[in-house]
């Protein structure tokens, strides 16, 4: 007896729709608008803490310019009593202040300026790291939400097929075991949907908790085909290295430590304290005016402080070298992964299309009685998992390309003084605006 064509063909069409060829016109990118991203990043506690450290560095620079010394006023009132004479009122006034040597003044200003520069770059780096975290959590939420949407569509398709088979069983056109098999498939699809929805909710909560100011859309809008990373790999690596705030911060700290070491060596010549002294004795009958010069003594302690500061400067130079090494390595890895993930997405798309085509053939074979229900269900599950993998690979590709652009400060970055470097930066393709 010829079987009635099942409604599994409807499921095949539904599964085949997202696996469209890459040549289709891609919609707008699924990344959030940059103005909302910048607002969300600037409200994070990490960025606010870096702003506070920047304000502190400014205050410390002012302290360095002013210096550690302030005028000191000393007053000594006293009473003198001489036998056979009357009691005399006497007093002594001292006004003194420490004076830095000119070389120390220059070094203190250099230290303060380097500290401000390091704090400013650290603030920008905190902004950059927040952009990285936002991209990672946004992509996690996209993967989870897209999987939940697909699982929901798959469950609806299985439900329609199960209802169709149930009608055929009532009419005697299908065996009861086929309905049982579809009941099991429907239960599995429902469990997969529940898990996907839980994952999507957890990802949304995590993203909203860290970036509460970033509004999330109700549904994920993914591009039909993620754009590849344009331009030359070496140019991207060079641009990331050139605009790295991590390297800039380490370099500024190295300059600061070097200036502090030179300042500590200069401190071996102590600063003098110069003052004026006025004395009135015997009720004003005797008066004296003088200049005081006080020089601290002690060589061993100052020599030890200079040695410690020199060691700190050497450590800062080593940390700068490590920062350059790490940024170079991470930049090369990010560019390589951007290329690789786009290739992976292409292969996953091909696998999803092939799996969907195989599922369609299995549906026709089942309708003609050439294949059993178990073979059809296996083909359907394979197609579903392949489509899920293709969707994840597409989001991975978008995330990897955006990560390169974030690291290169091409997107989601508060451009400031380093914009002047763009004129001499390597030639790169025009990057699309994020909407």
Image (cartoon, rainbow, N blue to C red):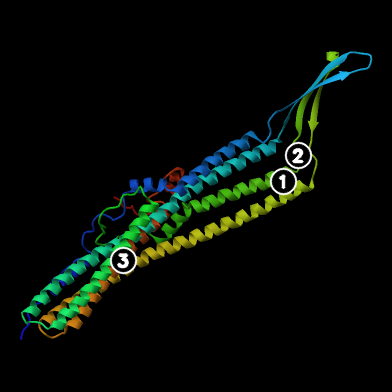
Mark in the foreground, 2 or 1 = 2
- Residue 70 horizontal/vertical position (percent): 68, 31
How many angstroms separate mark 1 from mark 3 (CA)? 59 Å
Q: Which residue is mark 2?
A: 270
Depth check, front residue: 98 or 263: 98
Q: Which residue is mark 1?
A: 265
On screen, residue 189 versus residue 411, left or right, reads left
Q: Which residue is mark 3?
A: 392
Q: Residue at x 17, y 69 (%)?
A: 157
Above or below 158: residue 288:
above
Instruction: Give SS at disc 1.
Output: helix
On screen, residue 200 versus residue 132, left or right, reads left
Mark in the foreground, 2 or 3 = 3
- Using the rendered image of the protein, determine whether residue 221 is visible from the camera's viewpoint: yes
Mark in the foreground, 1 or 3 = 3
How many angstroms separate mark 2 from mark 3 (CA)? 66 Å
- Residue 213 horizontal/vertical position (percent): 35, 47
- Callout 2 touching callout 1 (CB < 8 Å): no
Sequence-wise first label, 1 or 3 = 1
Q: Specify few, some or many for label 2: CA neighbours under 10 Å numbering under 14, 14-19, or 20 or more.
A: some
Depth check, front residue: 30 or 27: 30
Above or below 40: residue 176:
below
- Residue 351 horizontal/vertical position (percent): 26, 74
| Quadrant in which residue 137 is drawn | bottom left
Instruction: Give SS at disc 3.
Output: helix
On screen, residue 154 versus residue 276, left or right, reads left
| Quadrant in which residue 145 is drawn | bottom left
Instruction: Give SS at disc 2.
Output: loop
Q: Residue at x 51, y 60 (%)?
A: 326
Sequence-wise first label, 2 or 3 = 2
Above or below 342: residue 293:
above
- Callout 1 touching callout 3 (CB < 8 Å): no
């Amino acid at each position: 007896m010829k079987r009635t064509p099942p409604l599994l063909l409807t499921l095949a069409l539904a599964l085949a729709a997202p696996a469209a060829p890459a040549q289709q016109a891609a919609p707008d990118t699924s990344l959030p608008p940059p103005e909302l991203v910048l607002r969300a990043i600037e409200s994070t506690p990490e960025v606010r803490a870096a702003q506070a450290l920047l304000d502190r560095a400014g205050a410390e620079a002012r302290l360095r310019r002013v210096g550690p010394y302030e005028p000191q006023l000393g007053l000594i009132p006293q009473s003198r009593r001489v036998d056979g004479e009357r009691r005399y009122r006497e007093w002594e006034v001292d006004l003194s202040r420490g004076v830095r040597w000119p070389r120390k003044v220059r070094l203190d200003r250099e230290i303060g300026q380097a500290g401000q520069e390091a704090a400013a770059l650290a603030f920008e780096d905190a902004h950059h790291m927040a952009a990285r975290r936002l991209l990672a959590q946004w992509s996690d939420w996209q993967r989870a939400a897209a999987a939940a949407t697909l699982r929901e569509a798959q469950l609806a398709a299985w439900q329609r097929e199960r209802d169709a088979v149930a009608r055929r069983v009532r009419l005697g056109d299908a065996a009861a075991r086929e309905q049982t098999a579809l009941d099991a498939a429907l239960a599995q699809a429902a469990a997969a949907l529940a898990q996907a929805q839980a994952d999507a909710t957890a990802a949304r909560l995590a993203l909203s908790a860290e970036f509460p100011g970033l509004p999330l859309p109700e549904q994920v809008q993914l591009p039909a085909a993620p754009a590849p990373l344009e331009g030359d790999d070496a140019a991207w690596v060079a641009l990331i290295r050139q605009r790295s705030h991590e390297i800039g911060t380490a370099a500024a700290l190295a300059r600061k430590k070097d200036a502090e070491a030179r300042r500590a060596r200069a401190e071996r010549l102590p600063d003098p304290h110069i003052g004026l002294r006025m004395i009135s004795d015997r009720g004003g009958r005797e008066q004296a005016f003088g200049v005081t010069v006080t020089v601290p003594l002690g060589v061993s302690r100052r020599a030890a402080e200079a040695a410690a500061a020199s060691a700190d400067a050497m450590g800062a130079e080593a940390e700068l070298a490590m920062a350059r090494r790490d940024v170079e390595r991470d930049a090369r890895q990010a560019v390589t992964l951007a290329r690789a993930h786009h290739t992976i997405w292409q292969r996953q798309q091909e696998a999803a299309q092939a799996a969907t085509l195989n599922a369609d053939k299995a549906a026709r074979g089942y309708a003609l009685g050439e294949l059993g229900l178990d073979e059809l269900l296996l083909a359907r599950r394979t197609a579903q998992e392949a489509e899920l993998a293709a969707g994840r690979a597409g989001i991975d590709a978008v995330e990897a390309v955006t990560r390169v652009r974030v690291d290169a400060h091409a997107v989601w970055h508060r451009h400031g003084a380093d914009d002047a470097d763009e004129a001499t930066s390597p030639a790169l393709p025009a990057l699309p605006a994020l909407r």
